[in-house]
Amino acid sequence: MATLKLESTVLTVSQEEKDESSNPEQFLKSTESEMMELDSKTMRTTKPGVKRLIITLTVLFSFILWFTLLWKSVEIYRSPIPFRGIQAFSSQLDSEPLHFHCQFQAIFVGFNFTDSNDVALAITNKISQLNPNSSQCGNCGGHEVSVVIDSKARSPFKCGEEVDFLGGKLSDEDVDELLRGCLGKVDGGRNVYSVVVVNVGDKEAEVRAVVGKYRHAWILGRVLEEEALLKVAEIFARVFMNGGSEANSIRTEFMPVGADGRIVLSFSLLNAEPHDWIYDWNFREIDETLLQPVIQSLQPIANITVESQVLYHTQKSSFSYWDEVLGSHIFTTKDLPFFVNSNEWHLDTSVAAGGRSKVLQLVVAYIVSFLTHNYRYIPSAKECPLQLVLPNGDLSNTNGFISPMWGGVVVWNPQSCKKDLESKDPVRHMIPTQDLQKLFEILMGQLRQLFGLKSDNLYIGQSGKYILQGSERGFTQWELDVLSRNHACFNLYSCSATLGSLSRLVQSLPRMIITDEIGKKVMFSLEAAKFALSNASAGIYDASAASSGQARSLAEDSFFHPSIMSVQHYPYMHYLVMYTGMHITVQPKK
């Protein structure tokens, strides 16, 4: 019975639908009649007015305000970075090599030159032949040569000592000071390199050529005109331009200066075997008398700090052998890669060398005992004295060596290598003052080599020998100019590369947060680089080096900012790998 009722109901409903579809007019009339039956009191008789418009606008404004606040809440803050300025700075360095303006002055006394312009042109051509890489960065690409001719066999300097100067009666130090005053009065420019050639004396006498500690040199003796031009050009091209290095041997990154412009000079005194004896030094006195002038002279190039330490039980890692002829233990240049014992020489313990500072290790090693590979002492194998033999078979005058960008080592042997074998408590000795001064002279020579300069006071060129006067400050003025030019060049190119990498990184990651600190440092870096370029073109080398160092340091600080480093070491691919694993169902093995 239930089944029959359901079927009848279905049939009834279907029949009604069929009737409606068959009579559409009747269906419309029934619908209209139902609408007429609605209550007229509740029915709207007018069109929507201002009230509905106000409500609609209020809702729309609320939605726009909410969307704006939501957009600002998820917006990535990016401080403005001068991308065009960075591109223009990089393009300028790439298209035009950095040229430093150098002004040369040659003064000839006692020659028969007629036209100074022809002489200046001849010197310029010889400079180009001697230094074909004059357009190299850090070199004097834009140089100017001026010539002063005095054919009356008298000195053009009105200092009251012309006769002694012409006769060679003054010492090199006195002549150096004399020329400093006279040349300053003649030209008045502090960055003018001058060479004075005085054609006096006998033909058979030796021609003396000296380069002073300021920015001038002098040649005394009977020389031919062509020879004089060659000597003057060689001093300009090889000494004043390149610092006396052979064939532009200064490397691109030749100076061990940190990215933050700091150098830590770490002096270490190593006692190999304290059971034999213990040596100490008076480093405070050396620091005040010898190191401080050097630090002050290098101030435009780097901010230098000094520290010292005395270490014990610091044996070397290489072997040596006894030589009966020389009467000492010998180690050769082949042993140098194994000489430094990194396991026992705890040198890198500086607290001041934080960040990106550079540490130079200057080590005085006092070796008195032999170390086997299993770190056991062999009492019968004493190594005092210990000497370094050069590849040509001669003993090293300094008994030391350097490692580029790391530092230097000097082996010091005391006057007496005897010790009391029965003494259980060795006495602490102080290195004699004379030996200590000699050691620091060697260490200063090593420091000069680490900076790319010559360690001796003699330059041998094509036209003869030249004596290079030393300075009590460790570096002469013209050497500091060479260092400043090369240092400014390297800093500017490093700054350009760092800012270019930062620009490409920021543009490739549009969701990266760029703080105001990064933007300000980039702006200041570009401004310092522009100052360095302007000072370089004006010939102000120390200011150019200081500005370029500041530009490089700010660029490095911007690129290695913690916020940028976090993005570099945690890119978006890591997010994808992390969150993908949370949403993918792992199919268990059956």
Image: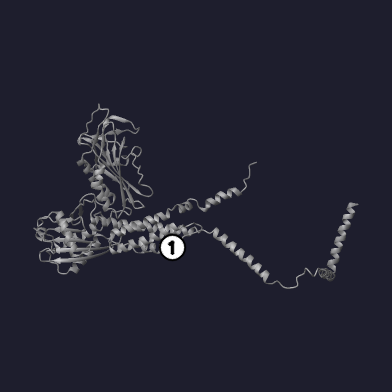
- Position of the C terminus, as image quadrant, is top right
Q: Nearer the viewer, residue 356 or 371?
A: 356
Q: Nearer the viewer, residue 213 or 91?
A: 213
| Residue 452 x %, y % | 28, 52
* Residue 558 appears left or right of 195: right
| Residue 61 x %, y % | 61, 66
Query: Can residue 539 be seen by looking at this rendering?
Result: yes
269 vs 117: above or below: above
| Residue drawn at 36 percent across, 49 percent down | 357
Q: Residues within 10 Å of mark 1 (few under 14, many from 20)?
A: some
* Residue 563 appears left or right of 223: right
Q: Which residue is mark 1?
A: 83
Dot 1: element: helix
| Residue 98 x %, y % | 32, 62
Q: Nearer the viewer, residue 44 or 252?
A: 44
| Residue 13 x %, y % | 85, 61
| Residue drawn at 87 percent across, 55 percent down | 6
Query: Can residue 137 be seen by looking at this rendering?
Result: no
